[in-house]
């Protein structure tokens, strides 16, 4: 118990000049937190009380679900993160430092490597599994633009937990145990939330969900169907793959389309020279990528933009993904920049994927794999077939 007369507290009359969201303004004015530097805050007594109350609820639910608490240091050696390749993958977001002997260390952005190494060193038999452990610990990420107070800081507290299971059935049971504990935690904290399908990200995995609390200052966007209950992060939306009647599509037609390497120039020539009355949505983009050394083409309608994050998330097992460059075109003379089409993909050894909006039976205007030439009525399912559908826009 604290008496107000002895409480270390000073409230402020005015909003802090750098605060843009209500939570940031109120936490500072009410004497819960004080800024130290960009994205770094001190917690005053009222803030610490609130923080510990939240941690208590989380611990209650984790312990109730059978999870055991551990604690790792924030200062970590380079080696485990170098072996997982995340020393490089984190890029500038990782706080790196050296000790007086010149050995490399980091401030932990997350602790997957440490959890795995701990269990590996302590357990040696399948009979020891399943195991579920967690920690509540400070994390560090060198955010390019810290903002919104404690919502997007460079130092923050995270509860992370992990299960180690014998098989897929055990993994599913642990997943559901996690899920139930999270639901109880959010309910006890009085938060309105939606559970949405999400992209697994760099850690991979066959299933991922996010618990999102709607607010005006959020950084994620999701869709929610009030009728069927479907909910997904916009990066993880799954569209239904549909079909059209292939027999109704005209035969392919080769067209002379000089100086049309872009969708805009192609549409202009088609409408002026051929009186086609088309728009960008009638054309087919062929986005060329290199995935672990393999040439990949992603097909999307011409009026859409490829989302490389979604592509990377949906190309299972791919470790390195990048856009085609001029040097790649030089190595592959059969692929003409600005005039690529899917009809020769198999012959050229290209892996072909389509966004679900490129439906089977649909016909398109697309490159003829020859400079200044395009093809009309190129039909999916007749003139080309894809290796799979992935969400790409």
Image (spheres, helix red, strand yellow):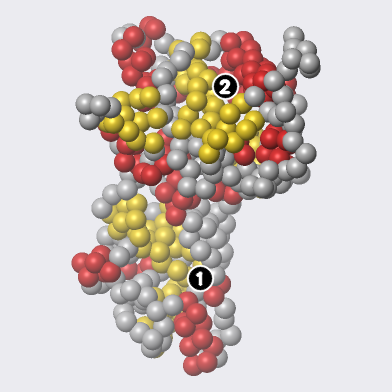
Residue at the spot 51% in from the left edge and 52% down from the top edge: 391
- The image position of residue 98, as x and y in percent, is 29, 31
Tell whether 361 sits left or right of 13: left
Position in image of residue 241 (x %, y %): 55, 54
Residue 118 seen in the current view: yes
Quadrant in which residue 93 is drawn: top left
Which numbered disc covers residue 178?
Answer: 2
* Residue position marked by numbered label 1 in the rendering: 302
The residue positioned farthest toward the bottom in the image shown: 273
Number of numbered callouts drawn: 2
Residue 174: % across, % down: 52, 19
Is residue 386 in view from this perspective? no
- Which type of secondary structure does the marked residue at label 2 adopt? helix
Rendering quarter of residue 46: top right
Q: Give the label, 2 or 1, closer to the camera.
A: 2
The residue lying toward the viewer, choosing from 113 and 291, is 113
Where residue 285 appears, x then y in whole percent?
Answer: 45, 69
């Amino acid at each position: 118990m604290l008496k107000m007369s002895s409480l270390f507290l000073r409230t402020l009359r005015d909003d802090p000049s750098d605060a843009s969201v209500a939570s940031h303004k109120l936490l500072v004015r009410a004497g819960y937190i004080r800024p130290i530097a960009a994205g770094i805050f001190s917690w005053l007594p009222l803030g610490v009380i609130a923080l510990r109350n939240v941690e208590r609820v989380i611990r209650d639910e984790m312990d109730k679900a059978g999870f055991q608490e551990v604690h790792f240091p924030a200062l970590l050696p380079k080696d485990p993160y170098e072996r997982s390749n995340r020393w490089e993958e984190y890029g500038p977001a990782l706080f790196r430092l050296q000790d007086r002997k010149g050995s490399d260390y980091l401030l932990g952005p997350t602790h997957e490597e440490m959890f795995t190494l701990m269990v590996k060193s302590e357990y040696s038999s399948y009979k020891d599994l399943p195991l579920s452990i967690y920690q509540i610990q400070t994390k560090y990420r060198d955010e390019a633009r810290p903002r919104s107070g404690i919502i997007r800081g460079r130092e923050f507290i995270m509860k992370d937990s992990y299960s180690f299971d014998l098989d897929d059935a055990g993994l599913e049971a642990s997943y559901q145990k996690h899920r139930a504990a999270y639901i109880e935690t959010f309910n006890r904290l009085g938060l309105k939330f939606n559970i949405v399908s999400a992209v697994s990200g760099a850690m991979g995995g066959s299933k991922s969900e996010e618990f999102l609390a709607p607010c005006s200052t959020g950084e994620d966007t999701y869709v929610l169907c009030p009728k069927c209950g479907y909910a997904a992060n916009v990066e993880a939306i799954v569209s239904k793959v549909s079909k059209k009647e292939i027999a109704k599509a005209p035969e392919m037609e080769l067209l002379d389309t000089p100086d049309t390497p872009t969708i805009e120039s192609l549409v202009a020539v088609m409408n002026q020279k051929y009186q086609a009355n088309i728009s960008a949505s009638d054309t087919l983009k062929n986005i060329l990528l290199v995935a672990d050394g393999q040439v990949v083409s992603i097909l999307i309608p011409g009026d859409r933009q490829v989302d490389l994050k979604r592509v990377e998330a949906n190309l299972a097992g791919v470790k390195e993904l990048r856009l085609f460059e001029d040097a790649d075109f030089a190595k592959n003379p059969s692929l003409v920049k600005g005039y690529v089409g899917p009809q020769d993909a198999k012959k050229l050894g290209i892996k072909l994927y389509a966004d679900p909006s490129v439906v089977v039976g649909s016909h398109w205007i697309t490159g003829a794999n020859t400079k200044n030439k395009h093809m009309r009525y190129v039909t999916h399912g007749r003139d080309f077939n894809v290796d799979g559908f992935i969400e790409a826009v």
